[in-house]
Image (cartoon, rainbow, N blue to C red):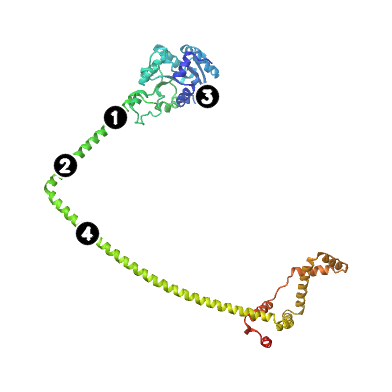
Amino acid sequence: MKDSFYSAFEKKYRGSREQIGARLEAYIPTIAPLLDIYPQASALDLGCGRGEWLEMVSRMGFDARGVDLDEGMLSYCTELNLKAEKAEAIASLKALPDESIALISSFHLVEHIGFENVRSLINESLRVLKPGGLLILETPNAENLQVGTHTFHLDPTHDKPIPHQLLEFVAEYAGFHRTKIMRLQEPGHISLENEQFSLTDVLLSVSPDYSVVAQKVADEAILAQFDTPFATRYGVSLIEMANAYDDRIQHKEDAQLARVQTMQEEITELKTNLDRVESFSSSGVLEAKIRLEYENQQLALANKKLETEKAQLKAALELERDELEAALGFKNNQIKAALESENEQLKAALEQKTREYIDVSTAHHHVVYSRSWKMTKPYRFAGQQFRYVAQHGPVNRSKQIIKRILVALNHRLNRYPDIKAKLVKGVKKAGLEKIARRIYVKAQSTPHVVSTAEVLQHQDLVNQLHDPALLPVEVKEIFSKLK
């Protein structure tokens, strides 16, 4: 692909293929109904250039082909496998049969070929189009002052700008059923709804391109499918922007004029009030001065009285504080003396209890280590066992004693595993293994339980040692003889 002079010129001043392709999407709602009427409708693009339009309509489903005279432009189409050939536009139209094409387009071509050729192109398109078919003629919009006076003349192959009124009239005169003007490519902030555009926008930002969309007559059912696209408004005209700008300026001037009038009324009212003040001052200034001096004197007296009351209140508060501190000190001394007295009493009671504890401990020591206590131990043990037998019965008591002996023996044998092993071996030889195992398991699973009577008996003994008055008479007599 190699750019010709014109294809390089277009790339720099008109835009890239991607930019042009994005701009052409504005036509999709207008041409889409043709595919419902004529599936795979045929489309012819006159002056197809780099193929942006061919690529878009082919993607939509049209059977599209294009013609152009510039080989640099056509090289783009060839590289993209688009149907395009080197041919002259009007000659290509004349070679087509009547009502054979659904869509004919021409983007930025008519400004190159002269007015008479434009009329021939439109007339031949009307003949070739199918009923309801569309002709799209896009060209620079001379309403935009920058386009009409400057950018249009950048292209040396341009003939002259074609006003939209003239191009639309040629299509109507040729016999097209209806036409529509689409103004295109204006900046995004330009619209009649947005009234914040500037004078620069009015001069430079009117839609830089426009197109005439013309439709061939057809049945009402076919034409009805295009009512919405033909009723849709696109872009803004120079007159509309100028009028909107004038309205905004006029509205701003009216608002400023109203503000000035309001300020004048406020100034007049202030002057009137100032005259009243000056008139009042000349007649009553002395009276006002006397009243002010009297009020100042009254204020000074009130301040002096307030200072006196503050001093009296401060003295009273200080006196009350001293009285509270004295009462608090006296009460603290009383509490301290009471606490010291109670502390001395507690110390004396603690010493008394300590002496009693020493006496009881000494008596307990004498009793436990006395001859009489040791001499009476067998009698006490025998009496205890007698009570256990009376309480639990001889059989149960014997079982308890045996269990205790077995548990103690088991603990001892665990310390001497060799002896334990020999004993187990001897039991097996004697044929007493099952009986010994049953006794052993039962002894292990039934620990000795100290009876309530044993606990009470032990507690009685402890109480007697702590309080000699609780000892039995016989024990008291033994103690008296030992003394």
Quote the CA–CA distance across marks 2 and 4. Answer: 39 Å
Quote the CA–CA distance across marks 4 and 1. Answer: 64 Å
Sequence-first tag of 4 and 1? 1
Sequence-first tag of 3 and 2? 3
Sequence-first tag of 3 and 4? 3
Q: Residues within 10 Å of mark 4 (few under 14, many from 20)?
A: few
**Which residue is under mark 1?**
249
The residue drawn where x is 16% and y is 55% is 294
Quote the CA–CA distance across marks 3 and 4. Answer: 97 Å
Callout 4 secondary element: helix
Which one is closest to the eye, mark 3 or mark 4? 4
**Which residue is under mark 4?**
302
Quote the CA–CA distance across marks 2 and 1. Answer: 35 Å
> Image quadrant for the C terminus?
bottom right
The residue drawn where x is 20% and y is 59% is 301
- Residue type for callout 4: Ala
Q: Residues within 10 Å of mark 3 (few under 14, many from 20)?
A: few
User: 356 or 20: which is nearer to us?
Assistant: 356
Query: Is any atom of residue 240 visible in this view?
Result: no
Callout 3 secondary element: helix
Question: Measured from the top left, where is residue 170 in percent x and y?
Answer: 38, 16
Find residue 59 and name its label.
3
User: 303 or 106: which is nearer to us?
Assistant: 303
